[in-house]
Structure formats: C-alpha cells, structure tokens
Image (cartoon, helix red, strand yellow):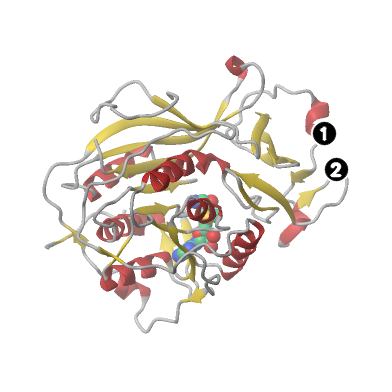
Amino acid sequence: MAGRKRDKAGRPGDRKGAPAKTRGAPHRDVTSKAGGKGGHRDAGGKPSSRDREPARKAGAKPAPIQVAAQDDKQASQLFDRPLTRHSGALPGERIPVILESLEDQGYQLLDSGNGEKLERYGPMRIVRPEAQALWPRRMKPGEWDNADAVFTGDTEEDGLGRWAFPKAPLGETWPMQLMGVDFHGRLTSFRHVGVFPEQLAHWRFMVDAIEARKGAPAKVLNLFGYTGVASLIAASAGAEVTHVDASKKAIGWARENQALAGLDKKPIRWICDDAMKFLLREEKRGNGYDLILTDPPKFGRGPNGEVWQLFDHLPLMLDVCRAVLSRNPIGLVLTAYSIRASFYSIHELMRETMRGAGGRVESGELIIRESGDDASEARALSTSLFSRWLPHE
Ligand SMILES: C[S@@+](CC[C@H](N)C(=O)[O-])C[C@H]1O[C@@H](n2cnc3c(N)ncnc32)[C@H](O)[C@@H]1O
C-alpha cells in the first residue's frame, strides 16, 4: 500500500435499478414522508477486509460515556498516515441528486422569505435567519408574529439570551419526535435547535437498510454525532451504534435523549473523542462498521484541543472511513454544511476514496421544502451538500 500525496485541500420512492453512471437532469429523491418510509434496501458488497467487533448486547445497562485519554502523540503526528493508493475503476455515479425531506409529523418548514425561515419543531414555532431565503414570505405577518421563539443573536452571551420569546418566556428544551423517536429540541446560542431535520432523508435510507439486514445487527458509526438523534434512530431500528463527538455537553444531551426515547437498553457506545483520532485508532484495532455517517463541521475542535479543518482533513477522514468499513457494508454517508464548495468537490473526493470498491457514489444537496396545501407554491431551501457511497450500482 503505497502512500500518496493529495492536495489539502426527486423522484419519489425507491431508487432500485437506477443507472449508475447517470448525469444531466437532477434526480429528486423524496425520501421522507410523514410517518412513512421511502428509500432503499441496498446492502452488501465489500471494499475492505476489516472484521466486525462485537458490541454490547441489547438489554444490557446503558453504557457509560467513554472519554478519550489525552494522547502522547500530537494530533499532527497521528494525521501523518499517508492516504491509501487504491487501484481499479472509479465507482459509478449519480449526479446531481437532490434529496428532499418531506415533512415528518414532528417537523415542518412553514414559510421562508426576507432572509428568515419559520419552522415547526414539534409544538414550537421558531423563526431563524436564513440568508438563502431571498424571496418574499408567503404567509401573513400574523403567522410569523405567532412564533414561540425567534433567534436574535444580539448578545455575545451563551444560552437563551440570544432568543426572544414573543408570547411567553420558555425554557431551553422541549419534547419532540422524529421518525417515532422522542428527544429534546433545544435552543442553543449558535441558533441550532438540537436537530437537523434535512437529515431525515439519510435516516430513512439508514433505517430501511438496517431493517433489511439479516443475521447480525448492522453496526453504525456516527461521527460528529451532536445530540444523538441519528444514533437513536439507528438503534431503534436495530443497529449497534457507536456515537462519537468531541463535546461532553453534546454527549450529555444525547444521553438525556436516549432516556427520553426509552432506548436506554439499546446498544449505543457514547464516545467523547476527536473524530479523526478515534477513526485512526479503530483502523489500528481492525474494527469495522457497516454504515458510517459523518457530518463534519467546517472547523471544530476535539476534546483535547485537536483541530479539525474540513478542507485539510476530509481526504484522510474518508480514506480511514473506507478502511474501517466492514466486509458487508451498507454505505458511507457524508454531509457538509456551510462550506464554499460545489458538491462536485466532495463527490469526486468520495469517488477517488472508493476507487476499486465498486458500487456507486451519489451526491448533491439536501433540501427542505415548504409545507402547505398547494405543492406548486412550495419553495425549497438548500441546507447542505452530501455525498454517499453505496455498495451496489
Ligand atoms: C452540530 S454538528 C455538525 C452539524 C453541521 N455539520 C454543522 O456544521 O453545523 C457538529 C458536532 O461536531 C462536533 N465536533 C466538532 N469538532 C469535532 C472533532 N474534532 N471531533 C469530534 N466531534 C467534533 C461538535 O461537538 C458538534 O456536536
């Protein structure tokens, strides 16, 4: 295995049978309907030779949070691992794919416009800035005035001070549910609300693939897992889950969500660690995962100050993700928010990473469409880029 230097750098329903090397007109995959299931049942194939590590058995006590010890090695040394040079053909491709999350009962994009969006998270109507909403609002001002919480961001302080409550003062959290899993919505000082509902499109695909597994439960690795909603949805579908995040606070929230969802007995390992370091260790240990979700921020820090820079570290991260895919993988799913890049940059990186592994890479944008009775009037908001490798063409 020689080292190689690289630069730092809908259609509704099932996609079975779609041509692998398709270009041109965008594909619209509408994968998330209220209460329903769409998506795929792809599983199988083999890009690496990693063995599967047994995880905790269902029914055991919830696992304690594992906090990574400070490493003797500097992160920069760990990251010296050269990129793997794979031979063989590039995987097939499907581009551009627009993955659209239609409303789940727990979430709706009610309206958008004038640089803001009005959403419903469970019982809460929330207004937040949305720079991409250049168009006018559809709803009457009274609907927007009826919001429960408005992100103002007008103080430097952490916490609720950056939110206004037009009707009545509210606490930081409230109960909500997506895909049948209960968790807490949460007003954060970064204007996030504890969940990214556009990811429902990936979660539908994930649940279908996990449920389609015969034999041993699917092993899912959720990197940059935040408040754990994807981990809980995977576990409730029957997967053994490893959840990694650098923030003890976020993992604490995820554990609260686990209890709220009644999933305490499900096999989830909660790991507070730098995502890159964790992956490199897993590679050394020879551990494998059937499905890897990675949702890296543009910039982040590990628990011991390790620096994550998407444009510097993503090629290595994907390379190691490939190395820790199991013999019978479901896929590798990457999302990227707020980066100045076209989906092509992560698409071509994913294809190079998976060279010789077969299957296909599909890439594009995750979007959310406004709800309402007149579908022809519903505008779509792009939320992020994604690229995912699937083992079947
Ligand atoms: C909010 S999520 C990602 C969502 C979305 N990609 C974004 O950029 O807004 C970011 C999560 O990554 C975690 N994180 C940041 N740097 C990390 C690192 N080096 N290793 C592991 N987790 C990290 C944060 O603690 C946070 O929970």
Residue position marked by numbered label 2 in the rendering = 166
Secondary element at tag 1: helix
Secondary element at tag 2: loop
In the depicted structure, whether residue 48 falls above or below residue 72: above
Residue depicted at x 62% and y 37%: 130
Query: 225 or 192, which is in the foreground?
Result: 225
* Residue type of the residue flagged with mark 2: Pro
Number of marks drawn: 2
Q: CA distance from mark 1 to mark 2?
A: 7 Å
Indicate if the residue with disc 1 has its beta carbon within 8 Å of ligand 1. Answer: no
Q: Position of residue 330 (x, y in %)?
A: 33, 48
Quadrant of the image containing the N terminus: bottom left
Q: Position of residue 325 (x, y in %)?
A: 29, 57
Q: Give left or right: position of 118 versus 221.
A: right
Q: Position of residue 308 (x, y in %)?
A: 43, 63
Query: 6 or 212, which is in the foreground?
Result: 212
Q: Do the CB atoms of the residues marked 1 and 2 lie less than 8 Å apart?
A: yes
Which disc, if any, is residue 113?
none
Residue depicted at x 38% and y 56%: 217
Q: Going from the N terminus, do you reach mark 1 or mark 2 first?
A: 1
**Where on the picture, by quarter, is residue 310?**
bottom left
Query: 59 or 148, which is in the foreground?
Result: 59
Query: 313 or 369, which is in the foreground?
Result: 369
Quadrant of the image containing the C terminus: top left
Q: Position of residue 233 (x, y in %)?
A: 52, 50
* Residue type of the residue flagged with mark 1: Asp
Q: Residues within 10 Å of mark 1 (few under 14, many from 20)?
A: some
Q: Give left or right: position of 382 versus 194.
A: left
Residue position marked by numbered label 1 in the rendering = 145
